[in-house]
Image (tube, rainbow, N blue to C red):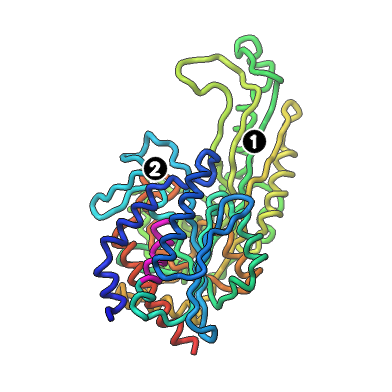
Amino acid sequence: MASVEEHIETNKERFLNELLDLLRIPSVSADPKYKADVARCAEAVKTRMEEAGLEKVEVCPTKGHPIVYGEKIIDPAKPTVLVYGHYDVQPADPLELWDSPPFEPVIKDDVIYARGSADDKGQFYMHVKAVEAMVKTGNLPCNVKMMIEGEEEVGSENLGTFVKENKKKLAADVVLISDTAMIANDVPSINTGLRGLSYLEVEVVGPNRDLHSGVYGGAVANPINVLCEMIANLHDKDHRINIPGFYDAVQELSDAERKELAKAPFNEKEWMDELGIKAARGEKGYSTSERATIRPTLDVNGIWGGYIGEGAKTVLASKASAKISMRLVPNQKSADITKLFSDHFNKIAPPYVTVTVKPHHGGEAAVTPTDSIAYKAASKAMEETFGKTPIPTRGGGSIPIVALFEDVLGLKTILFGFGLDSDNIHSPNEHYGVFNYMKGIATIPKFYQHFAEMSK
């Protein structure tokens, strides 16, 4: 019988083509017009999981988009790995900024360009193919359960209910997730922490209709101007968030912890050049990498109001709106921060406008230990395939379900990501390296091997 490595090498072209097929399905969870495509993608994931050798594979309906679940139990006495991922993707807008259609994947210079290639179809599908390689060659050393959802990009609203109602089904020893990034292809790393999230929408309303800016301008408050003034008030001169109580629960890292995290290589000049910016900006007293990982943030993700079509229209808008996200750090609770923001935003609103704050979704920050058996197994696996010991890092993004897994299932998570920060996730021209995809498939079986051996 072939080895795991031989199976991967023999089938690598098929593995790649199967991923491209998944990427052609526009499984955009945020837009109702793609509901049928999301369902179609769930069925495709189910088929691929069955082909890989997983059993009891099912598409589990929720009040939103479905969850795909499957398992392979070789011996109840052996340790169990619960794999989590998501098949839904971000909207592809603005389409005109893509070099190729977002749902027509192309491979250029050994890089796959498509929406969802890195986040998270390419990364979760590594696990499906790694399990296939272990099952088909008789080398699966422990039990595996796989849960791939369709709502991560809209806050995993129904996954929490599913997890709470299926604690026995999902019982495991560790959660394994590939939805994060490494430092570089020649500098492997393992993410040991994620920020939480509070995401909301605000609306500022002035007059009861759009007005002629010549007739009413200067006498009636312009909601667009007011909204911009209110947003500008949300940070102080040191770029700290200007909301009373916002920092009260922030967990400050010790100097020793900050020095340890600073060991991760980071070239700020190259980072700025890659982004096309001339300077970094952020909270006073912290490095650029710290601002993007261990500190909380507040950013406007979208803003609109008035006339934005071609040509001119001298209008004073009736209302203006914005979408705002706050990335949170350990001990900050998303519900508390959402309330603090809402209270503050209403308080600073001038009397000539009406403000509405609409919460969307949120999640909690999470930190995983580096002294656990699972982390050591992941580190050893990466060391074997990359030839270097991976560096522990903190991530700036959010995977809300990580905190829920710990709270409901009592499980810690290993964030076993193989992407890169430069993969343009959530942006036009999202991409994922063929190297990264195949390296993940090769590394994951080694994690299972070491985790099984160390758990004895």
Residue at position x 54%, y 44% from top? 30
Q: Position of residue 379 (x, y in %)?
A: 41, 76
The total number of labels drawn is 2
Give the residue pinned by disc 1: 230
> Dots 2 and 1: beta carbons under 8 Å?
no
Residue at position x 49%, y 64% from top? 394
Q: Find residue 101 and report its image quarter.
A: top left
SS type, badge 2: loop
Distance from Cα at disc 2 to Cα at disc 1 = 30 Å
Image: magenta residue range: 121-132
Magenta stretch holds residue 124: yes
- Closer to us: 434 or 426: 434
Q: Main secondary structure of the magenta part?
A: helix
Give the residue pinned by disc 2: 428
Q: Residue 287: which disc?
A: none
Q: Position of residue 85 (x, y in %)?
A: 49, 61
Image quadrant in which the N terminus is located: bottom left
Q: Position of residue 165 (x, y in %)?
A: 67, 65
Specify the farthest residue to the bottom.
456
Specify whether residue 294 is in view: no
